[in-house]
Image (cartoon, rainbow, N blue to C red):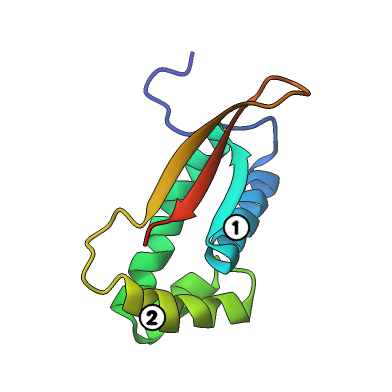
Amino acid sequence: MRHRRSGRKFGRATAQRRAMFRLMVTDLLRHEVIKTTHAKSKEVAPLAEKMLTHAKRGGLHNRRHAASFITDKEVLSKAFDELADRYRDRDGGYTRIIKLGKRQGDSAEMALIELVD
């Protein structure tokens, strides 16, 4: 039984799931909007929020922590330079999830996850 166990497994091993989340967060920070399933978007949003919070705080420790999760150095620089300045006055709530309806092939609930403003 999975009582009080948080998180979804998505039918993947732990390393595969973590790699998927790292790539999705990197793509979200690069493109500022991605289309994915609703369940994946709900798992990715808090991770992206944490990376943006690290970027806002700045400093070497936070940059190294974010670099261990974000897979592209250009995206890391964008997060710490451009996005950190954009969200300087916002305390959390950097992402928005918009439901799109069901995917035709397998009827999976789809969603857009985007960075606000």
Q: Which residue is drawn at 45% across and 57% down?
A: 48
Q: Residue 22 carries which label?
A: 1
**Where is 43 relative to 24, above or below?**
above
Percent x, y of residue 8: 54, 31
In this rendering, would 19 be left or right of 63?
Answer: right
**Where is 11 relative to 66, above or below?**
above
Q: Residue at x 55, y 37 (%)?
A: 111
The kind of residue tagged 2 is: His
Picture quarter containing residue 14?
Answer: top right
Foreground residue, 3 or 82?
Answer: 82
Q: Which mark is residue 61?
A: 2
Labels 1 & 2 near each other (Cβ < 8 A)? no
Percent x, y of residue 104: 74, 23
Percent x, y of residue 26: 59, 63
The kind of residue tagged 1 is: Arg
**Where is 67 relative to 24, above or below?**
below
Q: Residue at x 36, y 71 (%)?
A: 54
Mark 2 closeness class: few <14, some 14–19, many ≥20 residues within 10 Å: few
Instruction: Give the number of callouts.
Output: 2
**Where is 82 relative to 50, above or below?**
below
Depth-wise, is mark 1 or mark 2 nearer the camera?
1
Q: Which residue is drawn at 36% across and 62% down?
A: 117
Picture quarter containing residue 35?
Answer: top right
Foreground residue, 9 or 39?
Answer: 39
Assign a secondary structure to mark 2. helix
In this rendering, would 48 be left or right of 54?
Answer: right
